[in-house]
Amino acid sequence: MEREVQAVDSEFNQVLQNESCRLEQFHCHTAAPGHPFNKFFWGNKKNLVDAMENGINLCERILKLYRDYYHGGLMKLVVIGGERVPPPVAAAATSALQIPTIGIGAGPCCNGLMHASINQDRAAIFIPLFIGCSD
């Protein structure tokens, strides 16, 4: 386990001065208290050793995380193109897939393009860009 802890700590130390990593951690630190984004998302030797000293079995935790969250039912795929997917194609693709879908394509009043942004709570917002529809 010591070798793995050293590897995590080495990776952590390599990115300490990386501007994008520092900015990400700043956003985490300033997120609303209680929000999932308001956490320390990095691992280093100190927090791993502290966890082990507090009786946490890291190997068991990692395996549980893997079993609970690393499966196709929780994965997402977004395909971005320059044109909207025609409704018959969207319906056929949605019905043919063996994984849950939210829907493919856009409705008749949307050009299929989405504006994506992140709000103050660090939650993603997807807004359809409407082309104008009388309905």
Image (cartoon, helix red, strand yellow):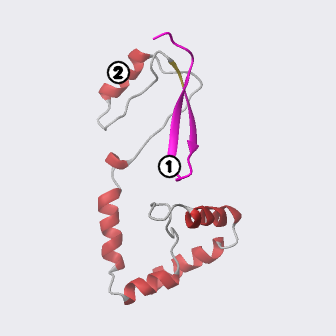
Examine the rendering and report whether any part of residue 36 can be seen: yes
Q: Find numbered disc 2 in the image and state the secondary structure of the residue it sits on.
A: helix
Eyeballing the image, is 91 above or below 19? Answer: above
Report the amino acid beneath label 1.
Answer: Ala
Query: Viewer-proximal residue, 5 or 104?
Result: 104
Q: Nearer the viewer, mark 1 or mark 2?
A: 1
- Measuring from the top left, give residue 44's x and y in whole percent: 53, 79
Examine the rendering and report whether any part of residue 1 can be seen: no
Residue positioned 62% across, 77% down in the render: 13
Label 1 CA crowd tier, 10 Å (few <14, some 14–19, many 20+): few
Residue positioned 48% across, 21% down in the render: 85
Magenta region includes residue 130: yes
Q: Find numbered disc 1 in the image and state the secondary structure of the residue it sits on.
A: loop
Magenta region includes residue 122: yes
Quadrant in the rendering for residue 29: bottom right
Eyeballing the image, is 69 above or below 104? Answer: below
- Measuring from the top left, give residue 10's x and y in whole percent: 58, 78
Query: Viewer-proximal residue, 38 or 11?
Result: 38
Label whose residue precedes the other's in the sequence (1 or 2): 2
- Measuring from the top left, give residue 130's x and y in whole percent: 55, 21
Q: Which mark is residue 123?
A: 1
Residue that mark 2 sits on: 92
Residue positioned 49% across, 17% down in the render: 109
Q: CA distance from mark 1 to mark 2?
A: 31 Å
Eyeballing the image, is 10 above or below 134? Answer: below
Quadrant in the rendering for residue 2: bottom left
The boundaries of the magenta stretch are 113-135
